[in-house]
Image (tube, rainbow, N blue to C red):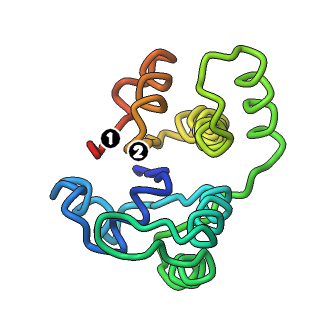
Amino acid sequence: MDFYLVDTNVIVWFLEGSVNLNHRIRDILLCRNSHIIFPVNVFDDLRIKHKNNFRSKYVDTPSPQIVMRIAKKVKNVFILPFDESAMIELIKLERSKELNKDPVDRKIVAAFLSLVGILCDKGHKLYIVTSDPDIKQFISKKGYDDNIYFVKR
């Protein structure tokens, strides 16, 4: 079974039907058999962007409440809490200073790192779907090249 952890931009672009997402990514996100994971911290990122009237190329950033309602209604979307194992990974990231200082990026990477081993041990595969080159580079450096779907901005 395949799981896809998505970052904030990917969520926004998917909901607005942006051309930034290629057909492969769009097909994955639309497939009923895909298991899509929204790390809980993307809702905080959406809150900040929405509050600051951040505008993407096409539409206003949706409110986190709207995205959360959508996520809860779709059966193959899961909201991933930021738990103890993710916090441990975040602390390691902060100590290593290998990743940029963006707290949202660090929490997304920490969520991925805390979950990838668990799912792998159960015979599943976890992919990260991101538009952030820093996240891509870091995940790749950690040996997870085959677990990245990179969306060019």
What x and y, as percent, mark residue 36? 46, 61
Q: Amino acid at mark 1?
A: Tyr
Is 65 rendered above or below residue 5?
below
Whether the residues at callouts 1 and 2 have beta carbons within 8 Å, the answer is yes
Quick one: SS at disc 1? strand
Could you tell me which residue is drawn at 50 percent across and 23 percent down? 138
Is 64 rendered above or below residue 79?
below
Q: Which residue is mark 2?
A: 130
State the mark number for residue 54.
none
Could you tell me which residue is drawn at 59 percent across and 36 percent down? 109
Disc nearer the start of the sequence (1/2)? 2
What x and y, as percent, mark residue 137? 42, 23
Q: Which residue is mark 1?
A: 149
Q: Nearer the viewer, residue 62 or 84?
A: 62
Q: Is residue 13 left or right of 104 when viewed as pictured?
A: left
Count the marks: how many?
2
Q: Residue furthest right?
A: 84
CA distance separating discs 1 and 2: 6 Å
